Image (cartoon, rainbow, N blue to C red):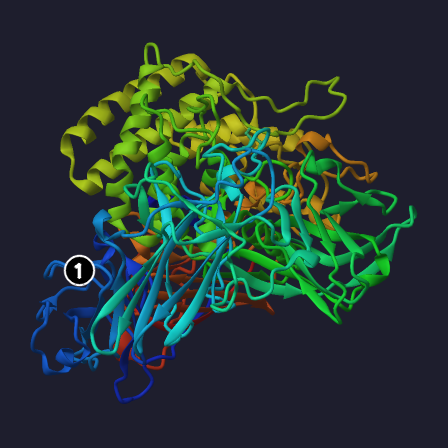
Amino acid sequence: MFGSKKANTDKIHLFSRRMILLLTIITFSSIGAQAQKLTLYDIKCGERVNPLGLDSSNIRFSWKIKSNRSNVLQSAYEIRVSNHIGSLKSNKDLIWKTGKVNTDQSIYIKYQGKELSSSTKYFWQVRIWDNQGNITPWSEVQYWETGLLKETDWNANWIKSGLSNSGKSGPAVMFRKTFKANKTIKSARLYSTAHGVYEASINGERVSDEYFAPGWTSYKKRLQYQVYDVTDYIKKGNNGIGIMVGEGWHRGNLSTGRNFYGREEALLAQIKIVYTDGSSELINTDNSWKASIDGPIRMSDFYNGETYDARKEINAWNTADFDDSMWKSVLTEPSLKYSNLVLSDAPPVREKAIIKPIKLIVSKKGEKILDFGQNMVGWVKFTVTGKKGDSVILRHAEVLDKDGNFYTENLRTASQQIIYVLKGTAEETFQPHFSFQGFRYVKVEGNKSLINDYNTEAVVLYSDMEATGKFETSNPLINQLQSNIQWGQKGNFLDVPTDCPQRNERYGWTGDAQVFFNTAAYNMDVKGFFTKWLKDLKSDQFSDGAIPHVVPYFWRSKQGGAAGWADAGTIIPWNYYHIYGDKQLLEQQYPSMKQWISFMTSKSKNYLWNTGEHFGDWLFYAPKDDLQGKSAITDKYLIAQTFYINSLQIAINTAKELGIKEDVEDYSKLLEKVKSAFVNEYVTSSGRLMSNTQTAYVLSLYFDVLPEAMRAQTAKYLVENIKSYGNHLTTGFLGTPYLCHVLSRFGYEDIAYTLLMQESFPSWLYPVKMGATTIWERWDGISPDGTFQNPDMNSFNHYAYGAIGDWMYKNIGGINSINGFPGFKKFSISPRPGGGLTSAKAELETVYGKISSSWSIKKGKIFLDIIIPPNTNAEVILPNSRSEAIISNLVKNDLKNLISRENEDQKFNLGSGNYHFEYKWNNI
Ligand code: BGC
């Protein structure tokens, strides 16, 4: 997936006629004899800062290094751990101390101390030494807390109301209990989960800012529970806990059915209170709890929205004083188990932004529509005053039709409708609970005067991932494309990577996730998000090795094993490894990779995989009236064979990393045969492919399917093909991510830029020119005349084609990982200006710290500023800056040993620091 050294060299030669005459390099970070400052930040255990709720397999330590000097590498670390904060300082009663370990490893250091207990807080510190004789002080004290490590730690019973088991859509279930805390409280934790989605509150206050807990997983095998710190919510004396459970993914509508995981909401909750005298107490869900379905949430559903009747609000239901004698006693459910309970690796869904409407539109049809200016995912929060029984109805849409009217046909059966019935008090503020909508426009019905652009705001919801990437250029259209890509990610990374967030679909389509993974991982920290999802992929894999079309899998019949979709099981773990450098993930997924390979092998005859149902190059270019045969149809089995080859190569690479020699040998032999079967079946002697399409050429070149000698010629056919479409792409989901990478690698960077800058359909910028604020599912979701594509498959928030983001970061910004140095321990910075851009800036926060590459062209000169984080090295490649280059720097001593020259290109092997280059650029 990542440019090989060979590929980089190819790119360099491409530029060999663009002479760079003068080169200046300045390193800023080592000016003069400064006082040494070496510090640590982003100190994490289990990938989080001071987490609550880790299981034993995830106790691993990582940190990042800050220094005001250049060329800094870690030379040693020391970690100490204790379950008493005091003993860290005294260095006594430690449960683990590493002593000084001489290594540059600063990520994923596994805890190897004494066995850990459940629900226990552990304190730890780290210090490091660098290669220049400096040492950090011990870090601030960090901590992590274990979750419930054994099944027997669960004392709570699963409970149900017995009121909501019709299997039909209905009201949310409210569970409650009053309990007493007799002494002064030191700490309290709530361990909870549900069948459905839930919100917990204590003494009238919501205990968390998370939405849609416990998230969506392969429920039967992996149901996540949450750990909340509720110390501040519980008081000495009487307390009330109330937990509301909605249908969620568990039993709500999904596609054409519902009740996929069960027919009734259920709850499991356990509060552990620790008193200051050292004693502790458990409050568990059991048959002393009460339930009601007579609350205000009359209906809540991901596709269809929420109906909330504020007249039915039950005052103080989640406090101690509430009289619940009229509520029903719950039923305990001993048949429900604990063995599938797991802690989450992923960040929860949170409110991430607030957007105010930009205008209020009255359409030709007289509809009153709020325009929020951005297609997004979340819900509308509003404040109204009115009479008791008045109602407000909000409908949500992504686009208006060509006449400016509200358009919802592309939502299929998802009604995305919020109905709020007023209770008639002075001011009422509302936002939904167990539903989310994909929208830019909101049509207000019912008592229209109640809602306007002043008293509404859109709340943007997505998994709480940190932004890691930044990308901007001198071209506003490209910047809008980048914004659309990022918004596509925000809208579709809501606990699982979904295809789209608005119509009656919203599942974890494997192909879409696979195609977009690299871009996603540059934009945001998706490590935890995909660790979780890949565990589900593995759990849901069928026994014959086929990987399902969607993960989590819930369909009632078995459907999986499609080329390019199922390959999410190999491609994502391998790419993840490059980006995050975490071998544990490869170990976790390797058995699943192997099973997938066995599936393809078992379905092949004479090494050709030409059986089964495939989606092919989904949504490739096809003109409406195709008299000339311009539709870019790629044979599905040709595609399947290329993905088989790629997955085999990944399995070989993974087996090498994990040191499994037999597999490397076996798979390598198989790979040769599978490759030659491809050539025999699909390739002419001159390197033309049986399907003369861009996707066919791109896949066979990107996956190194063809013999070396043939590749250059095949790349020419690709370029010919692009030209025959007037410099337009014709690729669908599978070819698109690799198209520009292949062009760059084979010396056609200019064509890659031409495609990127193309403004007419089909292209990345066509939707931008049409006003898109997210990535469309189809290249022509809206035609130039304003008419829509087939509403059955016409989402305006589908991230797959946003996969071009990967090429933009790697080629325009020039930030690439290097094979053999996962996690950007060593990386390359090799920006490739083109396409008329006069400046670009790319940044990536890696597991070692921030990489930055920023260039501009002024008066024939290129100015390049880069940042290389401590404990890493970079190859900075300035294409063809060769002999005439003049290098000057302020601290010659530091740089003397750092600069190397390879062939005729200027290549610097640089250590950490901030650098500035200036050189002449004749190609403008
Ligand atoms: C989804 C796609 C998905 C496809 C499978 C569609 O309904 O929206 O993104 O990959 O089905 O072909």
Disc 1 is placed on an element classified as loop
| Quadrant of res 362 | bottom right
Can residue 780 be seen?
Answer: no
Where is residue 530 shown, x and y percent of the image? Answer: 39, 47
Quarter in which the N terminus is drawn: top left
Looking at the image, residue 571 sits to the left or right of residue 556; the answer is left
Can residue 399 be seen?
Answer: yes
Where is residue 590 shown, x and y percent of the image? Answer: 26, 36
Looking at the image, residue 865 sits to the left or right of residue 453; the answer is left
Label 1 CB sits under 8 Å from any ligand 1 atom? no
Ligand 1 quadrant? top right
133 shown above or below 779: below
Kindly give the residue lying farthest to the front in the view shown.
Answer: 325
Where is residue 68 shown, x and y percent of the image? Answer: 32, 81
Q: Residue at x 57, y 44 (%)?
A: 799
408 shown above or below 15: above
Q: Nearer the viewer, residue 382 or 807?
A: 382
Q: Residue at x 39, y 16 (%)?
A: 609
Q: Residue at x 53, y 41 (%)?
A: 163
Quarter in which the C terminus is drawn: bottom right
Q: Nearer the viewer, residue 290 or 257?
A: 290
241 shown above or below 627: below
Q: Nearer the viewer, residue 435 or 660?
A: 435
Residue beneath label 1, please? 117
| Type of amino acid at the residue the image marks with label 1 | Ser
| Quadrant of res 654 | top left
Where is residue 212 shown, x and y percent of the image? Answer: 50, 52
Looking at the image, residue 666 sits to the left or right of residue 733; the answer is left
Q: Nearer the viewer, residue 461 or 491?
A: 461
Q: How many marks?
A: 1
User: Badge 1: how crowded within 10 Å, few (<14), some, or many (20+)?
Assistant: some
